[in-house]
Image: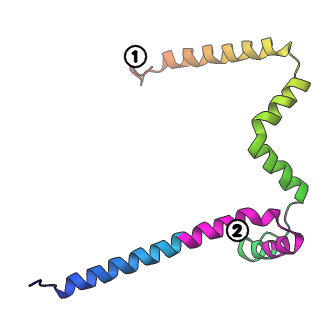
Amino acid sequence: MVNITNSSIKSRILYAYAVLFLTRVIHNYVIWRLIMDVMPHMPPQYEATRAEFRRVLLGVLTDRNRWNRCVEWTNKKLGMAVGALFIRDNFNHDSKVTALEMIHDIRAAFNELLEENEWMDGETR
């Protein structure tokens, strides 16, 4: 014969409720993030709804222009590639030597300051 106490039943019910509740919260969060990430790419009527939501929740009076968001998105996703193209077309290669000298000087100055620190032991430096 199995003896199930009242507190055991309560704890199992609370555990089951917590699991169901947390699962629902996680699902809702994932769906919310998906919708909010896709919303800027939707047709204008959806953008208007998002703009109203942001106005009420965050006090944002106007959204940035679509072209501005597209440029920002491209920079976030392809920033290194776009930067490499820019550097290839616009960078003065003669100034690379100057930039490398500056980096060397900064590192040397940092190492000098590091050696002057009294609160660090030799191993840490």
Q: Nearer the viewer, residue 94 or 79?
A: 79
Which of marks 1 and 2 precedes in the sequence?
2
Q: Residue at x 49, y 15 (%)?
A: 115
Circle 2 — which element?
A: helix
**For residue 51, what is the image quadrant?**
bottom right
Above or below: residue 90 compared with residue 74: above
Q: Is residue 6 left or right of residue 77?
A: left
Q: Is residue 119 left or right of residue 60?
A: left
Residue 120 position, x and y percent, is 42, 23
**For residue 16, what is the image quadrant?**
bottom left
Give the main secondary structure, helix, strand or loop, of the magenta stretch.
helix
Other-residue count near label 1 (Cα within 10 Å), few / some / many at <14 / 14–19 / ≥20: few
Question: Circle 2 sits on which residue?
Answer: 35
- Give the quadrant of the N terminus: bottom left
Q: Amino acid at mark 2?
A: Ile
Above or below: residue 72 compared with residue 16: above
Q: Is residue 79 left or right of residue 124?
A: right
Question: Circle 1 sits on which residue?
Answer: 122
Q: Is residue 3 left or right of residue 35?
A: left
Residue 30 position, x and y percent, is 59, 66
Q: Nearer the viewer, residue 55 or 70?
A: 70
